[in-house]
């Protein structure tokens, strides 16, 4: 799937899609508490997507069964919601979903605290979000893609964390995953030149320990090999000649 440059109309639709998703996260964030199952969270979120007349694009994507990926503690991404997986005080939970609105996608992820969490886990969540914003500073037309990657990596590693390498950000538009890939670590080279009208997902996935992950027997849930807790922060971003625009804005963006 090639890199696509969006027209004004496409940008307007993606902005509308993203605003809906940003607001959904702000509302869900207020509801997360100990005793809920990961399936309950998925169901609350799916209802919000449907009530906004949008399509939950993860559901059925390569066979994924639910609207939201719900990943707890050492799970980094792609956790499958489960009625028997009950959140408890001190857990951290990552929600990740994609919705579409009039054919255009918005993709974002947030890690939330369940009740009171440890200082180290709070720092992990806050620093993962900060790593996103470090990357975002470089998301400007004329810059090279891996400047974003380097900024995310330098910030996260500077905190002593591991940057997940097996999963990367991506372009987005009519398709959930378009080119280019957006790594959170710096590959060799500079990467492609960013152009006005590109829309990309910047999504640091960060572990308190080592960056290596593996996939559970459910063939979806990615967990850290060392069992350390992980956080994920993702927004859909529009490249402009000046400040990048977060297309999935809100209090938790
Ligand atoms: N934001 C996730 C991704 O880009 C959403 C995937 S939907 C799933 O990988 F169905 F694959 F879970
Ligand atoms: Co994504």
Image: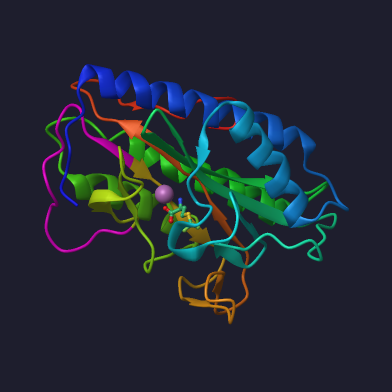
Q: Quadrant of residue 5?
A: top left
Position of 235 relative to 114 (above/below): above
Residue at 70% from the left image edge and 36% from the top image edge: 28
Position of 175 relative to 241 (above/below): below
Position of 91 relative to 211 (above/below): above
Nearest to the observer: residue 241 or residue 134:
241
Residue at 36% from the left image edge and 33% from the top image edge: 104
Q: Quadrant of residue 173?
A: top left
Q: Which residues are magenta?
A: 185-200
Q: How is the image coloured?
A: rainbow
- Magenta span: chief secondary structure: loop
Is residue 247 magenta-colored?
no
Q: Does 245 sit left or right of 109 as displayed?
A: left
Q: Position of residue 61 (x, y in %)?
A: 45, 57
Q: Is residue 243 visible?
A: no
Q: Position of residue 117 (x, y in %)?
A: 77, 51
Residue at 68% from the left image edge and 53% from the top image edge: 93
Residue placed furthest toward the right:
35
Residue at 65% from the left image edge and 32% from the top image edge: 48
Q: Position of residue 50 (x, y in %)?
A: 60, 33
């Amino acid at each position: 799937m090639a890199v696509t440059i969006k027209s004004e109309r496409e940008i307007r639709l993606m902005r509308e899609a993203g605003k809906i998703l940003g607001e959904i996260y702000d509302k869900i964030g207020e509801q997360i508490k100990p005793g809920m199952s990961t399936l309950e969270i998925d169901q609350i979120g799916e209802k919000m997507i449907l009530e906004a007349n949008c399509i939950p694009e993860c559901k059925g994507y390569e066979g994924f069964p639910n609207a939201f990926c719900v990943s707890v503690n050492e799970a980094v991404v792609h956790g499958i919601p489960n009625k028997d997986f009950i959140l408890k005080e001190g857990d951290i939970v990552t929600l990740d979903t994609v919705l579409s609105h009039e054919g255009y996608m918005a993709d974002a992820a947030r890690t939330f605290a369940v009740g009171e969490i440890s200082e180290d886990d709070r720092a992990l969540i806050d620093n993962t979000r900060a790593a996103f914003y470090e990357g975002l500073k470089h998301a400007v037309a004329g810059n090279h893609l891996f400047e974003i990657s380097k900024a995310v990596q330098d910030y996260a590693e500077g905190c002593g964390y591991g940057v997940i390498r097996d999963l990367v950000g991506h372009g987005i538009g009519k398709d959930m995953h378009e080119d280019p890939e957006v790594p959170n670590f710096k590959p060799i080279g500079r990467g492609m030149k960013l152009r006005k009208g590109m829309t990309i997902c910047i999504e640091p996935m960060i572990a308190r320990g080592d960056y290596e992950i593996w996939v559970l027997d459910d063939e979806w849930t990615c967990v850290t090999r060392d069992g350390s807790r992980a956080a994920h922060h993702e927004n859909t971003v529009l490249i402009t000649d000046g400040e990048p625009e977060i297309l999935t804005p809100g209090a938790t963006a």
